[in-house]
Structures are given as structure tokens and as C-alpha cells.
Image (spheres, rainbow, N blue to C red):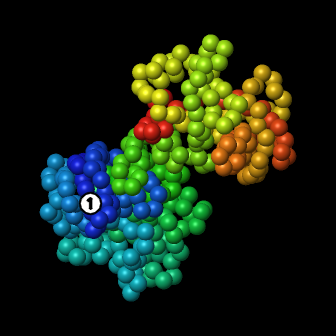
Amino acid sequence: MANIKLQNIVKRFGDVVAVKDFNLEIEDKEFVVFLGPSGCGKTTTLRLIAGLEHPDEGEILIDGYLVNGLSPADRDIAFVFQFYALYPHLSVYDNIAFPLKAVKVEKSEIDEQVKKVAKILQIDNVLNRKPSVLSGGEMQRVALGRAMVRQPKVYLLDEPMANLDAKLRIDTRAEIKRLQHEIGATTIFVTHDQVEAMSLADRIAVIHQGVLQQIGTPHDVYNKPENLFVAGFMGMPAMNLLDAEITSHEGKIVLQLSHTTVQLELSQQQQSHLNANTQNNGYVLGIRPEHITASREPAGRKIRADVHLIEPLGSVNILDLMLGTHQDTQEPILLRVRAHPTFLVELRDTIWLDFKNDQMHLFDSKTEQAIW
């Protein structure tokens, strides 16, 4: 398989910079997911690697060889698109065999490879059918099979499950992960679905406005976001992000949530990071809904909130809680909490909260970078 290195990649479309100073190294046999909202540059980056677009600046290396000037056919890369792009007049067998026939592989070798791939993908029973009579999941596996049969250095998958229903997405996701481990292929997968990214990736590259925001394992990207964008993008529901300021109360350094009465005492370690890494530009506190505990009784809890909205999701209830109001706009300051479905409350009930101190994140509101 292959090692891929992107060095200072820039891609422009007229006045729009789609990819900005992009640097990333992908190890041999690694499964990397490009994750970000629509229009962030993830597909453009994938197309640059494939050779379907050419960078305006920077270098793309595969196994140490510069490939900027190579055509897609010469890069030994297989691309699986969101739209399956199957040949409707050909059978499943001939669709999968097409790349091998194009390079004039022996007929017996083609037959062996097609049947082997079809068995792995569990579509060996539909080899004689045309794409028009296949289900969405079967068509997706045919597209994967056509890519796999070539045994290329790199697999590039551009939102290949976007057209599948929810259950089929889950099944296909598991299948793709199994296949990637079985084949040991260097794979880059593009999606805007963070659940897909978290479940598939060895590492996730979070992209926003053409800029690589963070690269790391699913655990690190979720639990150690490096900036406000990553913190707010990862998670369902998303991390709570609340304006705050540092102040003192009864001789202690505390974090005061703006326009609320909420004050959070900081540990010595948190204070040391604060002093060492930031100027007083203003702050944003981040805490995930699952890292807040709710109770009907105060029981030592210091944070009071009123129930603003309840979203029952079966396995959990998502509570929108009102902590205060913005003085200028009078808009409510809301906090989302993940609660057990047996925790029953009504609208406008008052409940009490605890924040897990070691799960709080603090960001500089000016630079948007994480402080801790």
C-alpha cells in the first residue's frame, strides 16, 4: 500500500481559496477520515490526491514520489464516488471486471479476482444482474468491488454512503471497516457525518474553510478539541460553549459565566494553564452534555437552572436548561444536558446541576484556541 504526504497544499477557484496551506501525512495502511461541513474543502483535497484537480501550490507525495504532474491513471489510486457511477448496460460481473479488462489482464485472472472480491463483499449471488435491479446497498458494494479488484495503493471514498438509508448505512459502515482491516489498504474517507468518522477512522482530519483544524484519533478529537470549531462540531448534541470571564470570589479564582450567576471554582492545575498560556482576551467555557449531572434536589449542587425544552430520544432525554438571559438581546442562555430517560421533569421546573471539573474545556475567545 502507500504513504501519502501533503505539503503546503493550496487550491484556488478564482478568488475562492478552497484549500489553504494544507499539511498532512497519512501512514501506510492507515484509515483517515476527512470530516467537516459542506463546502469545507474535504472533497477538493481528496480530488487533489486523486489527480482530478491540480494544486496551485505545494506538493503531493505518494510513497515518497512527487505526483503533482501525474494523471489519475498513473497514481494507482481507486476512487469510489457518492454516486455509484456503474455502467447500466453491464452486469455486476462486468462492472467489477472493467478496470482489469481495460489493462488487458488475462481472462482467467479476471475471473478469479472478480469472484474473490464478490465473495468478500457478499455479492457473489448477483454477478449476472444489471445495476437497475440492485438495491442501494448492493450497488454501493459493486462500486467498492470495482475499486478493490484493481488492488491499488490507495482507496479514496467520497461520501460513499450518503444515498443509503439509516440501517443500510450502519451495515455498510461495519462492512467497510472490516474490509479495510482485511485488505490492509491505505484509505481516505470523506464525510460530514461525525458518527461515520468516529466509528471508521484510525485518525480524523477535521477541516473547516479549507484549513486543517485538527488531526488525531477519534478519542483525541472528541475529548481534546484544539479549538472552538472542533469543540462545537464534534458531538451529538454538540458541546455547550458559554462566554465566561475570570474573577475572584471569597479569595478564590473562579470562572464566571457571562450574564448568569454561575461561578465555577478552578483547580490549581487549571489556574496554572490559564496564567501560562493566555492573555485576558475573554474566554469560552466548553462542556459536553454528558459531563453534566442533573438532580431534582440541591444536595450540595451550586448551579440552578430552569427547564426550557425537553427532547425525549428513547435511550436519553436531552434537556435545554436556561441559566440566564443576555442583557442586550434578552435571548436565553441555554445549556444542554444529557439525562437518563427515567429523570422526569416538566417545562419550567427548577433543577440543580454539577459540572465534571476535569471534563471542562476553556478557550481563548479571541484566538479560539484551547487553553485547557
- Residue drawn at (39%, 55%), measured in percent from left and top? 209
Task: Say whether residue 3 is visible.
Answer: yes
Q: Residue furthest bottom?
A: 89
Of residues 76 and 327, which is closer to you in this image?
A: 327
User: 45 left or right of 331?
Assistant: left
- Residue drawn at (27%, 68%), measured in percent from left and top? 14
1 above or below 274? below
Task: Say whether residue 219 is visible.
Answer: no
Image coordinates for residue 302, horizontal then vertical, percent: 74, 25
- Residue drawn at (35%, 73%), measured in percent from left and top? 96
Image coordinates for residue 48, horizontal then vertical, percent: 27, 61
- Residue drawn at (54%, 68%), measured in percent from left and top? 164
Residue ID for mark 1: 11
Mark 1, other Cα within 10 Å: few <14 / some 14–19 / many ≥20 = many
Image coordinates for residue 87, horizontal then vertical, percent: 37, 81
Image coordinates for residue 147, horizontal then vertical, percent: 33, 66
Of residues 303 and 100, which is closer to you in this image?
A: 303
User: 325 left or right of 16?
Assistant: right
Which amino acid, mark 1? Lys
